[in-house]
Image (tube, helix red, strand yellow):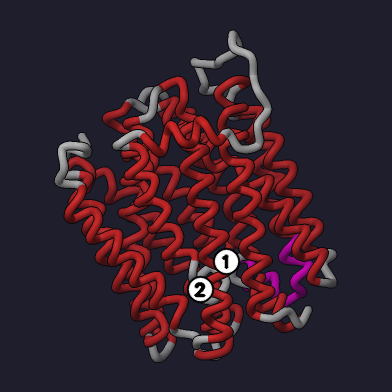
Amino acid sequence: MKNKASLSIIFLTVFIDLMGFGILIPILPTFASKDLGISDFGIGLIVAIYSLMQFFFNPLLGRISDRIGRRPVILVTQLLTVASYLMFSFSNSFLILFLSRLLAGLGGSNIGVAQAYIADITSKEERSKGMGIIGAAFGLGFVFGPLIGALLSKYGYHIAGYGSAAFSFLAFVFALFMLPESNQFKKTETKFQFRLFDLSYTKKIIAHPTLGFVIILFFIIIFSMANIYGTFALLGYKVYHFTDQQTGLLFGISGIIGASIQGGFMRILSNKFSYRNLVLAGSFFMMIGLGFLPYGVNFLGVAIVISILSIGTGILQPTILSMISRYAPENEQGSVLGINQSFSAFARVLGPLWGGFAYDFFGYQFPFLTGAAFTFFTFLLAYFLLKSERLPETKNV
């Protein structure tokens, strides 16, 4: 790595921030359903608005970070996240809960900036390892966050909101004093145009034969996974009759496995296997995991299935992010990764909307089977198209 100290700091910053995010994820659907009486489709809307905000603001924040640096963008968005969690604690209606998730989505639109930070401090050859490390921060955040959330929810859902706010504020303080600037290619010499969504630049990136194809792959993968964002907790609550603590434990198991894959095993896998083979393997595990989630029978069965799913996502996400960053210009990492995060955010809008609709009107199995079907489509695309000259089977060394 070019800068191991900076890598450790961004890891800790993202990890602490994601603990705050992870506290709410497993309890948000049950809180909305039990305490506020919101319908399953309404829960899908609440989950979706978070990602809709990211769809619009990820590219903008990526462009801003290319111009003024990553650090100030990360700091401001963390403060917005703190405010959103405090609003959650006072939610007593659909509207307030909806607005709290809208603000959280704006604050959470720094994901592409964090990924660009990793790209700034790693070489192209080491990029998948760097993306794996930030993926591990996400995974560990989802280990401890849901467990803490399940514990705090015993004392009231508003207490869980305060806990999330506290962790995000801690991440802000840590970044304020410890996180150095990473962007050495600031575009201060050019005039900045404030566009919420730069359609012409987006078309240019999607038209790129390599970047466009890989961004589409990532979109399909995220959509497949997003089908269960608002429905997995409902599946546990309504079908398997899990407690909040059991659901939190399942999220914790998923996070441990995902963090282990991305933070440790990706170093080995990326040196031994091509991008194509890693995408094929990840798609296969993810397809099996999604397809069998509604047929897990009991807690042990669901734990095994979600472990398989976590292996797949743990392989896929850092691999594809590394591919995108590898082919993006060095001085446009924030912009390109921001566009990718925008498309993945749109997938997180469509996924929960379809997942909530399918759960309500077709049955609890359908969101998971939809995800499995689209992941199988990803497997086919990787099998047939990653062989082409457009995307050579490059070894990730």
Which residue is located at x 68 percent, y 40 percent?
Answer: 77
Residue 8 visible in image? no
Instruction: Report the disc number at residue 76.
Output: none
Badge 1 is on which residue?
146
The answer to whether residue 353 is left or right of residue 299 is right
Badge 2 is on which residue?
249
Question: Which corner quadrant holds the N terminus?
Answer: top left
Assess whether residue 152 is covered by the magenta stretch: yes
Which residue is located at x 17 percent, y 54 percent?
Answer: 384
Image quarter of residue 346: bottom right
Name the amino acid type tagged 1: Pro
Foreground: 339 or 260? 339
In primary-sequence order, the first of circles 2 and 1 is: 1
Residue 33 visible in image? yes
- Please tell me whether the stretch drawn in magenta is mainly helix, strand or loop: helix
- Judged from this view, the residue extending furthest toward the top is 189
Label 1: element kind? helix
Q: Position of residue 66 (x, y in %)?
A: 55, 24
